[in-house]
Structures are given as structure tokens and as C-alpha cells.
Image (cartoon, rainbow, N blue to C red):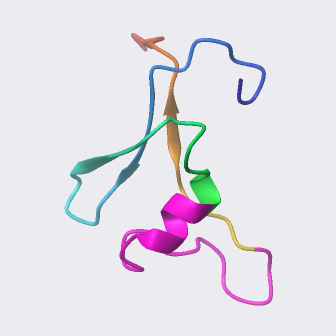
Amino acid sequence: MWFGCKNICRLFVRTETGETQMIPMTDVVSIRDYIHSQDRALFTPIYPVPIQVVYRIYLDDGHMCLC
């Protein structure tokens, strides 16, 4: 359960070209370990140092906005 949401369909990141790369949702590998095992270009911090590291990871809960 993340951000109070019980129905998480998927976690993903978007590459610079707009492609979607899925993040595995498993208890075997933590998100932290997964990020450290991937290409640094895929997980670039949003804010510069010395601010705490924040990555842009998208959470899909299945809801759609028709705005």
C-alpha cells in the first residue's frame, strides 16, 4: 500500500524519449535496490544537490481523468 492507495496496478518511469519502463512490484527487491541496479540516466534526481534525492516515479491506480 503506497500513498494510502490499496489498488496499485503498476509503477513506472518514463524515459527521455517518452517510453515507459515498468518497475517490478515485489517484496523480493526494494524500490531502492531496483533504482541502484538500473542505468543512472533512467533515474536522474529531479532537484540538484544538496536537496534530498527525489525521483519521478509514476503510480498507476487504474483511475482515468476525462478532463
Viewport quadrant of the C terminus: top left
Residue at left offset 67%, top offset 13%: 6
Would you place residue 51 above or below residue 18 in this image?
below
Extreme-front residue of the structure:
28
* Residue 42 placement: quadrant: bottom left
The location of residue 51, given as percent across then percent down, is: 80, 80
Would you place residue 56 above or below residue 41 in this image?
above
* Number of on-image labels: 0
Question: Which of the two residues, 37 or 65, is positioned nearer the viewer here?
Answer: 37
User: Is 16 left or right of 65, judged from the image as shown?
Assistant: left
User: Is 38 left or right of 21, judged from the image as shown?
Assistant: right
Residue at left offset 66%, top offset 76%: 47
Extreme-bottom residue of the structure:
49
Residue 42 among those drawn in magenta: yes
Residue at left offset 58%, top offset 12%: 7
The location of residue 62, given as percent across then percent down, is: 45, 13
Would you place residue 31 above or below residue 10 in this image?
below
The location of residue 43, given as percent across then percent down, is: 47, 69
Question: Which of the two residues, 67 or 25, is positioned nearer the viewer here?
Answer: 25
Would you place residue 11 above or below residue 55 in this image?
above
Residue 47 among those drawn in magenta: yes
The location of residue 2, given as percent across then percent down, is: 71, 30
- The magenta region covers 33-52
* Dominant secondary structure of the residues highlighted in magenta in the image: loop
Residue at left offset 59%, top offset 53%: 31
User: Is 36 left or right of 16, judged from the image as shown?
Assistant: right
* Residue 33 placement: quadrant: bottom right
Viewport quadrant of the N terminus: top right
